[in-house]
Image: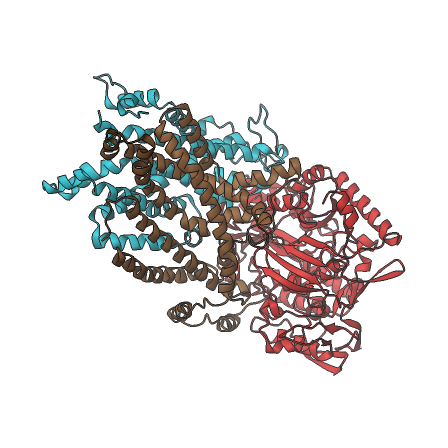
Chain colours: A cyan, B red, C brown
C-alpha cells in the first residue's frame, strides 16, 4: 500500500494564483471537504443576508397560528408563539456564525500563543505555564460559566469571551504537545546550531509545523463553540431571548414538546448538526492540503 | 387541546373510582412500590428539619412526622366530597380533621385546648430513641424548638404567648390576640411538625435521625435523585372503605423521584417507571393521552400566581396610570385562549377561586378592576401620554433563566408592550441570583415571577405588606399593612371574608403588577393506582396522608404489562 | 525521570491550593449567597436574621479564616458538611464519584474503540470512499448536540415501543445488568461525540508520521507493513490522542451534566450544578477538589506517557 503524497496532490498548472490553485486542489482532491465548505458558506450567507431572506421578523408573534406545521405560508412551521421558524432559523444562523467565529478565533489565538511560547522556550516558563493551565483545566467549567455569567449578565460578548478563554487555555496543551514534538526534530536543532534567532525559528520552523494542528483546532473550535452555546442554552445560561439562537430554539419548551411539533426541534437541531459537520470536514480537508511536509515532498 | 375530552376522562375516572371504592366491591391490596413524580418533581429535599424553616420540609419530612391537624380526605372530590385538596397552604375550615389531635376547643377567646389521641407511638430508632408513646411534652418541645430557631420567620408566632402541657394528652395554646391563621401556623402548616424530644440530643438536620409517628420512615436519600420512604408497620391510622377499616399505608414503599427534565418525566410516566406525575403542563396532556390512553387524569388550577412585578418605588412605575396602561396593553384573554389553549383563568391571583368566601370573581369586581383585564391599547397609549410618556419608554425585565413558561411568555409580553411604545429588555438570571435580587431589593424595574398563593391572608401580606421579602413591587402603605393585620385578627368569618375581598379588589386596582393568567396543570396516574383522585396536599405542602391511602391493583398492573 | 515525577507530584499542591482558593472565593462572589436563599423562605427577613443565620453556619468569619479552616480540615480528609442538609461532603462525594467515573470510563472506552480504528483506517486509505464514510460518521456524531440526541432517544422509543432506558440508578456491583441498562445509552452518546476529536487527531498524526523519515526508512528496510504501522507510526501518533484523553478528563469526571440530567444519573455534574444553584459552598469546594485532583493526576499520567510513546521527548 502506498500513500504517495505526489499522487494525492497531482501536478499543478503554473501561472495560476496561489489562492485559485488552492481552491482547485480543494475541489479536485477533497470533494467532501469542499462540500463542507460550500455548505458552510451557504449558512454564512444565510446569516449575513437574514434580513433580506427572512419572510418575517424573527420575533413576530402570531398566537393564532401557533404550532402551525410546515406549509407554504410557514415553510418550516411556527413555534409556541406563532413565530415563523424559517425566519428564526435564518437569523439564528447569523448569531451562530458570529459566536462560532469569534469564539473560535479568540480561543485559537490564546492556544497558539500559550502553546508556542511555553512549548518552545520550555524550562521554568513552560513548567509554570503548564501548572497554571493545569489549575485552569481542573476548574469545573460549570462553576466558571455560572460565576462569570451571573456576574456580568448573560449576553453574546460575554459568552464569546468565556468560551474563548475556556477552549483557548485548554487547547494550548495540544499546541504545546505538537511544538515539543517538533522542537525535538532534527531540523530545528540544525537551525539552532547555525544561530537562527528564536522568533525566526518560531516563525519559519515551529509555526508551519504546528499549523495543521492549529487549523484543526480552529475548525474544531468553531463547531465546539456553536455546540457549547447550545449547551449553555439548555442550562438556561445562553444568549437571552428574544434573540433567536439555535441553541435556545432547541432547548426549553421546543425540546420538551418536540412530539407536538417535530419541526420545532428537528430544524434547529439539524442546522447545528449540519454546520458543525461541514466546518469539521472542511477543516480536515484544509489540514491535508496545508500540511507543510506534503509541500516539502514535492 | 380538546377540553371536553379531558373533562370526560376525569369524570369517567372519578366515577369508576368512586363506584369501585364506595360500593365496597373492591378490597384494597397491600404491598408494592409507588414511584411518584411529585408536584416538586424537579426539586430534591432541601432540608428534613422543620427548625430550618424551609418551605418544602413538610413535603419531604412530613412523610415521617405528623402534625396536629390534617385534611379530612374523606371529603375529597375523588371520594365524592366537595374539596380538591390542591391548595398549597389552605384547608377550608370544614375540611380539617385532627391528625395527632383528637379534638380541640376554645376554652376562652384566647385559649385553645388540644387533646391528643392516645396510644400513638414513636417507633424504635436505634441511636436516637426507644419506642414510646407520644405525649403533650413532645408538642411543647417541638413548638419551642421551631420558634427559637435562628432561621425563624420574625413575627410568625407573635400571636402565641405560650404553649403548655396540661397533662400527658392535653396541650394548651395561650394567645395574646386572635389570628385567623392559628390552625395553619401551628397545626397543619409549614412549620408545625411534632417530633420526639429525644431529638434534642442528636443532629436533627441529618436525615438519618429523622423519626416521627407518621405513616412512613425515610430509609434512603440521594440528593438530586430520590427519597425512599418505607412503610411504618406500626402506624396508628386506619382507612375506612365501605364498612371495613384497614390499617395503612397500603404500599410498602413510596419513592419520590427527582427528575429535572420534562421530556424525561413524561417518558418515565409513559413507560410506567413512575406511577403518578403530579405536574403535567396542559401542552403535554393531549399527546400523553394519545400515546398512553390508559392514564387517568385530574386537572387543577395552579396555586402559583404569575405576574410581572413593577417597582412602584421608582420611575416610571410610581405612576399608577403607567401601571394600569401596561395591564391594558396586554391581551390577557388572548393569552388564556391561545398561549394556554384555554387552560388558564384570567383572574385567580392574588386570590384563588378555591378560597370560597374570600374570592370574588372578576365579573363582580368594580369596573375599574375589570378594565385591567380587558385589552385596550388605545386607552393604554392615552394613559401613557397623560403620565408624560407619549412615546413610551424602555425598561429591564428580569426573569429566572430556568423557567420555560416565563421564557416563552416574555417575548409575547414584550410584543404587546412594543405596540404601545414600551420596549422591554429581557434579562434572564440564574435562579438563585434572580431570587436574591428580589430579597435584597436590588432587582430591576420589571420582575417576571411566580409566587405561591398559599392562603387568603398570606398571599396579600407577603406580597404587599411593607418590607416583606416577597414584595417585588416594593409596595409600602402603612394603612394597607394595618388593614391586612386587622383582617387576619378578625374573629368573625364573614366579616373577615368581606375585608379580604375589599383589600384584594383595591390592590388589584392599584396594578402593582401586570396581572397574568393562572394556568391549569394536570395530575396523571396509571389506573392501578387506586383510592386516589389527584389530591395534592393534605396540609401545607404535605401529601403524606394521601400517599398512605393509595393502594396498588397488582393484577391490573400485571395485565397492563408492567 | 523519577525526580520529574516527584517534582510534578509536589507541584500538585500549589496548583490545587491556588485553584481551591479561586473556587472558594468565586462561589461566594456569585450574586445571591446562601444566606439570601435561606432567608428567602421567610416572610420578613431583617438584618439581625442574616447575622444569626450567618453565625449558625459559621459564615460570619472573615473569608481567609473560613478558607484556612476548610483547607486545614481538608488536609485531614474532612471536607465539611452540606450547608443545607448537614451531611458530610465526603459521604456525598463517595456516593457520586463512582457513578461519574463509570460513565466516564464507559464513554472513553466507546470513544477510543471507535476513534482509533477509524483514525488509522482513514489515514491509511486517505481520500477513498471508506475514509469519507467512516470519518463522516465519526464527525457527524460530534456535530449532533448531545442534549438533543439524548432527548430524541428519551422521547421517541418510549412513544413507538414504550421503551426507555432504566431511569433509577442502581450500583454497578449491586446489579450490573440493571446498571448498564441505564448507563449504556448516555455513555454511547458521550463516547461517540468524543470519538470524532480523537479520531481526527489520530488520523492527523498518522498521516504526518507515515511521511516521516523513520517510517520511510523502516519501509525501505523492508519491514512488514503492519509492523511499520503499529510499531512506529501508531505509537508516535498516539501522542495527541493521549493529550486528548487528558483534556477530556475533567469533562468525563464532572462535565456530563447534561447527560446526567436527561438520563437521571446522580453523578458529580448534577451534584455540582445543584450545589452551585443552592450555594452549598462546602459541596462546591469538595467537588472541585476531587475533580481537580483527579484531573491533575490524569494530566501527569498523560505527560509521562509522552515519554513512553515518543522516545524523543525528554523530561527536565
Residue B91 in view in this figure = yes
Quarter occupied by the N terminus of chain B: top right
Which corner quadrant of the image does residue A253 belong to?
A: top right
Question: On the rendered structure, is C150 left or right of C251?
Answer: right
Image height of B433 relative to C134, above or below: below
Question: On the rendered structure, is B142 left or right of B438?
Answer: right
Name the spot of residue B245 as percent of width and height, x first: 85, 62
- Which is more toward the observer, B559 or C226? C226
Residue C194 in view in this figure = no
Question: On the rendered structure, is B100 left or right of C292?
Answer: right
Name the spot of residue A185 as percent of width and height, x first: 20, 40
- Which is more toward the observer, A191 or B165? A191
Name the spot of residue A216 as percent of width and height, x first: 33, 36
Residue visible at 79% across and 41% down in the picture: B8
Which corner quadrant of the image does residue A221 belong to?
A: top left
Name the spot of residue B550 as percent of width and height, x first: 76, 56
Amino acid at each position: 500500500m502506498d500513500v504517495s503524497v505526489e499522487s494525492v496532490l497531482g501536478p499543478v498548472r503554473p501561472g495560476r494564483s496561489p489562492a485559485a490553485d488552492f481552491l482547485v486542489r480543494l475541489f479536485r482532491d477533497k470533494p467532501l471537504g469542499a462540500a463542507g465548505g460550500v455548505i458552510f458558506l451557504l449558512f454564512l450567507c444565510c446569516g449575513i443576508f437574514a434580513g433580506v431572506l427572512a419572510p418575517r421578523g424573527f420575533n413576530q408573534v402570531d398566537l393564532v397560528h401557533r404550532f402551525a406545521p410546515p406549509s407554504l405560508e410557514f415553510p418550516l412551521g411556527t413555534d409556541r408563539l406563532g413565530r415563523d421558524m424559517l425566519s428564526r432559523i435564518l437569523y439564528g444562523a447569523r448569531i451562530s456564525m458570529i459566536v462560532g467565529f469569534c469564539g473560535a478565533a479568540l480561543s485559537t489565538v490564546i492556544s497558539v500563543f500559550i502553546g508556542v511560547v511555553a512549548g518552545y522556550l520550555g524550562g521554568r516558563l513552560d513548567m509554570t505555564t503548564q501548572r497554571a493551565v493545569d489549575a485552569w483545566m481542573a476548574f469545573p467549567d460549570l462553576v466558571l460559566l455560572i460565576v462569570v455569567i451571573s456576574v456580568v449578565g448573560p449576553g453574546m460578548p460575554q459568552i464569546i469571551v468565556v468560551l474563548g478563554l475556556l477552549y483557548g487555555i485548554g487547547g494550548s496543551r495540544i499546541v504545546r504537545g505538537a511544538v515539543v514534538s517538533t522542537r525535538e526534530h532534527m531540523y530545528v536543532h540544525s537551525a539552532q546550531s547555525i544561530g537562527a534567532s528564536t522568533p525566526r525559528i518560531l516563525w519559519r520552523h515551529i509555526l508551519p509545523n504546528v499549523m495543521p494542528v492549529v487549523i484543526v483546532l480552529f475548525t474544531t473550535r468553531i463547531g465546539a463553540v456553536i455546540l457549547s452555546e447550545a449547551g449553555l442554552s439548555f442550562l438556561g445560561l445562553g444568549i437571552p431571548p428574544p434573540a433567536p439562537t439555535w441553541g435556545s430554539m432547541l432547548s426549553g419548551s421546543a425540546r420538551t414538546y418536540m412530539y407536538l411539533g417535530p419541526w420545532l426541534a428537528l430544524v434547529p437541531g439539524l442546522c447545528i448538526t449540519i454546520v458543525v459537520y461541514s466546518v469539521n470536514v472542511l477543516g480536515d480537508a484544509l489540514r491535508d492540503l496545508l500540511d507543510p511536509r506534503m509541500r516539502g515532498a514535492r | 387541546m380538546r377540553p371536553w375530552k379531558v373533562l370526560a376522562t376525569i369524570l369517567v375516572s372519578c366515577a369508576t373510582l368512586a363506584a369501585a371504592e364506595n360500593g365496597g366491591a373492591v378490597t384494597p391490596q397491600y404491598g408494592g412500590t409507588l414511584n411518584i413524580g411529585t408536584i416538586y418533581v424537579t426539586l430534591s429535599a432541601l432540608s428534613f428539619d422543620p427548625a430550618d424553616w424551609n418551605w418544602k420540609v413538610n413535603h419531604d419530612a412530613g412523610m415521617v412526622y405528623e402534625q396536629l391537624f390534617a385534611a379530612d380526605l374523606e371529603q375529597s372530590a375523588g371520594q365524592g366530597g366537595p374539596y380538591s385538596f390542591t391548595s398549597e397552604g389552605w384547608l377550608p375550615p370544614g375540611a380539617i380533621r385532627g391528625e395527632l389531635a383528637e379534638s380541640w376547643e376554645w376554652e376562652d377567646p384566647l385559649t385553645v385546648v388540644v387533646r391528643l389521641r392516645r396510644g400513638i407511638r414513636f417507633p424504635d430508632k436505634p441511636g436516637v430513641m426507644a419506642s414510646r408513646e407520644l405525649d403533650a411534652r413532645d408538642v411543647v418541645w417541638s413548638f419551642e424548638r421551631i420558634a427559637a430557631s435562628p432561621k425563624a420567620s420574625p413575627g410568625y408566632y407573635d400571636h402565641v404567648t405560650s404553649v403548655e402541657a396540661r397533662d400527658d394528652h392535653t396541650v394548651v395554646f395561650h394567645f395574646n390576640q386572635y389570628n385567623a391563621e392559628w390552625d395553619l401556623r401551628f397545626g397543619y402548616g409549614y412549620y408545625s411538625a411534632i417530633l420526639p424530644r429525644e431529638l434534642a440530643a442528636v443532629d436533627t438536620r441529618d436525615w438519618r435521625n429523622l423519626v416521627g409517628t407518621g405513616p412512613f420512615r425515610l430509609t434512603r436519600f440521594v440528593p438530586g435523585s430520590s427519597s425512599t420512604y418505607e412503610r411504618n408497620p406500626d402506624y396508628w391510622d386506619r382507612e375506612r372503605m365501605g364498612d371495613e377499616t384497614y390499617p395503612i399505608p397500603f404500599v410498602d414503599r413510596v419513592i419520590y423521584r427527582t427528575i429535572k427534565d420534562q421530556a424525561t418525566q413524561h417518558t418515565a410516566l409513559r413507560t410506567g417507571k413512575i406511577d403518578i406525575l403530579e405536574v403535567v403542563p396542559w401542552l403535554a396532556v393531549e399527546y400523553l393521552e394519545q400515546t398512553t390512553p390508559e392514564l387517568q387524569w385530574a386537572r387543577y388550577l395552579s396555586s402559583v400566581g404569575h405576574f410581572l412585578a413593577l417597582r412602584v418605588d421608582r420611575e416610571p412605575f410610581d405612576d399608577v396610570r403607567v401601571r394600569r396602561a401596561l395591564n391594558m396593553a396586554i391581551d390577557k384573554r388572548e393569552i388564556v385562549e391561545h398561549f394556554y389553549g384555554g387552560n388558564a383563568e384570567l383572574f385567580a391571583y392574588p386570590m384563588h377561586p378555591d378560597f370560597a368566601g374570600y374570592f370574588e370573581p372578576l365579573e363582580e369586581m368594580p369596573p375599574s378592576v375589570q378594565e385591567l383585564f380587558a385589552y385596550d391599547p388605545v386607552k393604554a397609549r392615552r394613559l401613557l401620554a397623560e403620565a408624560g410618556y407619549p412615546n413610551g419608554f424602555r425598561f429591564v425585565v428580569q426573569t429566572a433563566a430556568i423557567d420555560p413558561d416565563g421564557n416563552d411568555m416574555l417575548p409575547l409580553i414584550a410584543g404587546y408592550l412594543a405596540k404601545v411604545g414600551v420596549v422591554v429588555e429581557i434579562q434572564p438570571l440564574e435562579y438563585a441570583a434572580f431570587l436574591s435580587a428580589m430579597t435584597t431589593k436590588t432587582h430591576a424595574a420589571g420582575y417576571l415571577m411566580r409566587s405561591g398563593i398559599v392562603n387568603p391572608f398570606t398571599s396579600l401580606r407577603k406580597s404587599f405588606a411593607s418590607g416583606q421579602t416577597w414584595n417585588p413591587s416594593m409596595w409600602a402603605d402603612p394603612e394597607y399593612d394595618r388593614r391586612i393585620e386587622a383582617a387576619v385578627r378578625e374573629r368573625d368569618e364573614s366579616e373577615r371574608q368581606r375585608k379580604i375581598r375589599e383589600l384584594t379588589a383595591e390592590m388589584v386596582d392599584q396594578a402593582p403588577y401586570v396581572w397574568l393568567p393562572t394556568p391549569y396543570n394536570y395530575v396523571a396516574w396509571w389506573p392501578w393506582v387506586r383510592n386516589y383522585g389527584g389530591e395534592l396536599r393534605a396540609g401545607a405542602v404535605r401529601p403524606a396522608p394521601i400517599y398512605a391511602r393509595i393502594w396498588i391493583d397488582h393484577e391490573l398492573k400485571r395485565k397492563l404489562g408492567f | 525521570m523519577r525526580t520529574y515525577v516527584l517534582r510534578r507530584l509536589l507541584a500538585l499542591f500549589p496548583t490545587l491550593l491556588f485553584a481551591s482558593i479561586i473556587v472558594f472565593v468565586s462561589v461566594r462572589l456569585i450574586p445571591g449567597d446562601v444566606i439570601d436563599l435561606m432567608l428567602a423562605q421567610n416572610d420578613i427577613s431583617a438584618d439581625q436574621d442574616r447575622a444569626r443565620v450567618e453565625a449558625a453556619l459559621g459564615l460570619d468569619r472573615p473569608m481567609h479564616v473560613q478558607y484556612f479552616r476548610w483547607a486545614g480540615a481538608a488536609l485531614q480528609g474532612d471536607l465539611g458538611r452540606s450547608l443545607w442538609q448537614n451531611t458530610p461532603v465526603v459521604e456525598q462525594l463517595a456516593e457520586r464519584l463512582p457513578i461519574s467515573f463509570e460513565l466516564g470510563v464507559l464513554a472513553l472506552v466507546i470513544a477510543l474503540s471507535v476513534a482509533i480504528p477509524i483514525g488509522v483506517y482513514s489515514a491509511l486509505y486517505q481520500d477513498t470512499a471508506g475514509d469519507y464514510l467512516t470519518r463522516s460518521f465519526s464527525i457527524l456524531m460530534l456535530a449532533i448536540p448531545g442534549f438533543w440526541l439524548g432527548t430524541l432517544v428519551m422521547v421517541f422509543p418510549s412513544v413507538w415501543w414504550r421503551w426507555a432506558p432504566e431511569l433509577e440508578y442502581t450500583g454497578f456491583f449491586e446489579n450490573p445488568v440493571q446498571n448498564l441498562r441505564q448507563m449504556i445509552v448516555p455513555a454511547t452518546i458521550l463516547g461517540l461525540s468524543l470519538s470524532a476529536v480523537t479520531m481526527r487527531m489520530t488520523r492527523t498524526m498518522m498521516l504526518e508520521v507515515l511521511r516521516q523519515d523513520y517510517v520511510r526508512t523502516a519501509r525501505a528496510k523492508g519491514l512488514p507493513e503492519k509492523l511499520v504501522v503499529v510499531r512506529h507510526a501508531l505509537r508516535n501518533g498516539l501522542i495527541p490522542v493521549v493529550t486528548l484523553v487528558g483534556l477530556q478528563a475533567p469533562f468525563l469526571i464532572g462535565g456530563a451534566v447534561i447527560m446526567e440530567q436527561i438520563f437521571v444519573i446522580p453523578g458529580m455534574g448534577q451534584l455540582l450544578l445543584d450545589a452551585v444553584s443552592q450555594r452549598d459552598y462546602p459541596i462546591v469546594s469538595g467537588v472541585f477538589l476531587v475533580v481537580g485532583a483527579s484531573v491533575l493526576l490524569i494530566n501527569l499520567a498523560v505527560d509521562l506517557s509522552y515519554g513512553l510513546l515518543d522516545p524523543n521527548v525528554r523530561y527536565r
